[in-house]
Amino acid sequence: MKRNNLMKVLLVTLCVALMLSIGCFAGDEAPASFAYNTLWAALPPIIAIGLALITKEVYSSLFLGITVGALLYTEFSFMPTFVHIFEGGIIANLSDSYNVGILIFLVILGVMVQLMNAAGGSAAFGKWSNENIKSRVTAQLSVIALGCLIFIDDYFNCLTVGSVMRPVTDKHKVSRAKLAYLIDATAAPVCIIAPISSWAAAVTGVIDGVEGLGLFINAIPYNYYALLTLFMMILMTVLKVEFGPMAKHEKNALEKGDIYTTPDRPYANATDEPLSTKGKVIDLVFPVVVLIVCCILGLVYTGGFFSGDATFASAFSGADASLGLTYGSFFGLVITVVFYMIRRVLTFRQMMDLIPDGFKAMVPAILILTFAWTLKSMTDSLGLKDFIADIVRTFPDTMLSFLPAVIFLIACVMAFATGTSWGTFGMLIPIVVAAFTDPAVGFLPGYETIGTILVSACMAGAVCGDHCSPISDTTIMASAGAQCNHLNHVQTQLPYAISAAGVSFVSYLIAGFIQNWIICLIIAFALMAAFVFIANIKTTQQKAKA
């Protein structure tokens, strides 16, 4: 009731503000905003995220954040506000070729998942898993292992791992919230340390003045958030440690068999019953392998590899991720259709009838993505990234050893507020690289190590903020892949992500002074292990009291 009343009050207040702003209408052009490049620029994402967490309703919360951003941009002018929301926001983002490519990729992935389920590949793998996976721990470790193997792209990771492992985790009473966390924690964190991934292509594409792929590889040992998240996840799974809201979801699933916990369970009636009874494990493995290979070929094709203009490494670093993944997923889909026809597990008519189902399965994710992209457009028009950049540039040289930890925090905040890790490191990495490199020689003498640590801090912070944000595309796709209520996923994952972020922050403080990747990585893992063991002791004590 309180949440509904809060939403009603906010909606009424917003409508009144819009009506009062009619008198300020002065044409279609928005004036220079007082909020540009100020702290006010952070208000729209704060409102959107805050309302989403309070009201448990994502769509209206995002739209209210978008509307507030447009009002600030136009200084409360009536018609320009709506022009900015739709023409400069929603329509512009849906007209952007890069975004359209991502949406096409998502739809094709949705269709692929439907085909694998209908062909019986997922069911066959689930049957094999049920015969060979005997415990909850093994089921969760299997999710982690599969997530690490599918490193080409985080979207592909989320949907494929979720579709394949849901039957296995459901059988062993693993909550959907925990499955969503395992998927999310092996999506972006794995992609950001995989040299052959769409994320590596995105990172190397924004690096100028030094060889991009080499810098990406050198930065991997310093990418503490990604490495510590994987380590923490495995250790907590083996030790059966849960805390925060996740503990409630897991207890409810284990003791009552309720894998959803909350009354809102949009996927509770979803069924993945196969159309074919001839399905085998190969009907799942073959499409996944083909899709990975085709996506890699699609990425290097867009980078000029097949035209002879670039080496494999340079083609991958210069690839157009959106276009390459679209090409790769399309050819992967075509090959899968032919494969299923040859195997006679599905007819051509049945496969064509599944295409709308694949599209419908992606509609919630597409809608949230569209609003999230539009919200980012609002913050861009208000100069949020410039505000963050000014903070970075004014950091004193005398405090250089503290800069990795500061950069990590800034990237976290920025990615959390905007919901995009690519946009965050796309803005921060060029600033960091430009500050410590010379176009003629690369990194300035003596700054090679600290420069590498700073680039890694940009990537780690971007992934961390993206991991925590309810408006992040990866977080949204993890919820869709696990068929979990989105806000349940956000709330249960947040304490785990913040814990890994805290240890990462301390690790970057240490790395800024020691600047030796071996020593720093050992210390980072030791700190994370200590945290998990302390959490395990407290969890054991709480169970004993209960």
Image: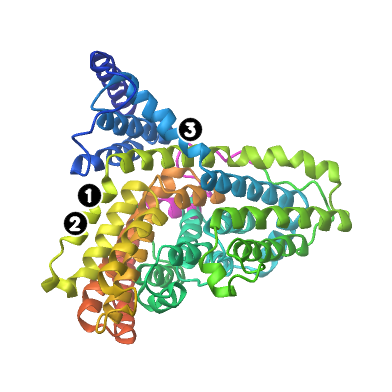
Q: Earlier in the sequence, mark 2 or mark 3?
A: 3
Q: Residues within 10 Å of mark 3 (few under 14, many from 20)?
A: some
Q: Is residue 243 visible?
A: no
Q: Which residue is mark 3?
A: 91
Q: Which residue is mark 1?
A: 387
Q: Are marks 2 and 3 in contact (CB under 8 Å)?
A: no
246 and 46: which is toward the camera: 46
Q: Residue at x 40, y 48 (%)?
A: 490
Q: Which residue is mark 2?
A: 391
Q: Residues within 10 Å of mark 1 (few under 14, many from 20)?
A: some
271 in relation to 441, above or below: above
Q: What is the x, y in percent for residue 517?
A: 33, 83
Q: Earlier in the sequence, mark 1 or mark 3?
A: 3
The residue at the far front in this view is: 440
Q: Residue at x 70, y 47 (%)?
A: 114
Q: Which residues are magenta?
A: 245-270
Magenta residue check for 256: yes
Disc 2 residue type?
A: Ile
Q: Residue at x 29, y 26 (%)?
A: 6
- Left/right placement of residue 487 relative to residue 318 reads left
Q: Are marks 2 and 1 in contact (CB under 8 Å)?
A: yes
- Residue at mark 2 to residue at mark 3: CA–CA distance: 32 Å
120 and 427: which is toward the camera: 427
